[in-house]
Amino acid sequence: MPTTESADNDQLFVLTAVLLTPAQFPSVLGDDYPEVCAGLGLEPYAEGYGLVLGQDSDGARWTVATEDVSLVACAIAAWDCGMEYDLSPGEHSIVGALPGWPLSLAVAAPGVPQPHDPEPQEGDPAPLAPPDAEEWGPAQRRLGADEIAMQWAAWREQVDDEDSFAEPGDHAHKGVRRVLEEARGYVSEPPPPGRVRSSFAAGEARTLRVDGPGWSMVARTDDIAFVLLDEEPGEVHPVGRGPALPALLSSLDELAARPV
């Protein structure tokens, strides 16, 4: 089991880690990078952070924030390939140890008590806790967009019939029209970092993830888009390319944050 050191020099048994950068962050935590950082009490530095989630020897949950983003990225890549990697950020790179976990974990460190929040000390922040994603709302809407991005082919197969598209014209769905207008606004006035993210897709295309107040959009630069709205629980609106969507997606891709 990888270990590192928490702020009080107690051993931390590492369970997992995630990146927190303008281009890559847990979408469930917010619509953009500064919002996620604010929720964790971190400054939204452009270089970003790595978040290491683990338990101390008493079983308490801790989230260690480190500036060594490359180290965390290497660890995640190795784990994804089924390889071992000892994730131990240097003490000089650790920004702080935050009580609790911001994400739900289904694993626990062996040989220590079950996961629990540490005993609060005077002046300590409230323990981090995962957003409530049981009911439809911003967190679940963003998780839904994540699923579409990961399972693009399966979702795309469901909308081959052009009649199912919400075309971006005068008769478009009101919510979809609002989303497209706000997304166009990003082109002329760039939003906070992370509101628009671009990642690899098949061929030369890119997968775009665009978020805003009450909405999320997932799109492929060579294809269509899907829109999710807070006010419509569980609904997914496919948006056909039409005459305007290709140019919009191209412009959004140019200003998007991209993984390094």
Image: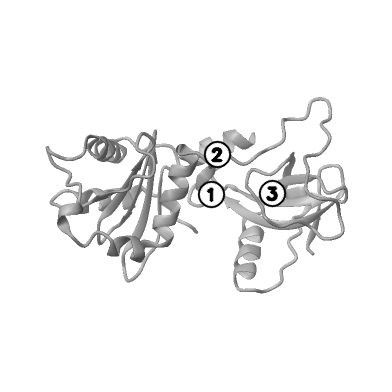
Q: Write down the quadrant of residue 109 in the picture.
A: bottom right
- Left or right of 136 in this view: 189: left
Let me know if residue 194 appears in the view: no
Circle on res. 36? 2
Q: Amino acid at mark 2?
A: Val
Residue 152: x percent and y percent? 36, 62
The image shows residue 143, relative to residue 179, as above or below, that is: below
User: Please, what secondary structure does the residue beneath circle 2 have?
Assistant: helix
Any mark on residue 66, and which?
Answer: 3
Which residue is at a point 38% across and 44% down the rendered structure image? 234
Residue at 72 percent across and 49 percent down: it is 93
Left of 96 or right of it: where is 78?
left
| Label 3 secondary element | strand
Would you say 150 lies left or right of 157 here? right
**Residue 2 visible (yes or no):** yes
- The residue carrying mark 1 is 25
Q: Nearer the viewer, residue 159 or 242?
A: 159
Which residue is at the front of the view, 3 or 152?
152
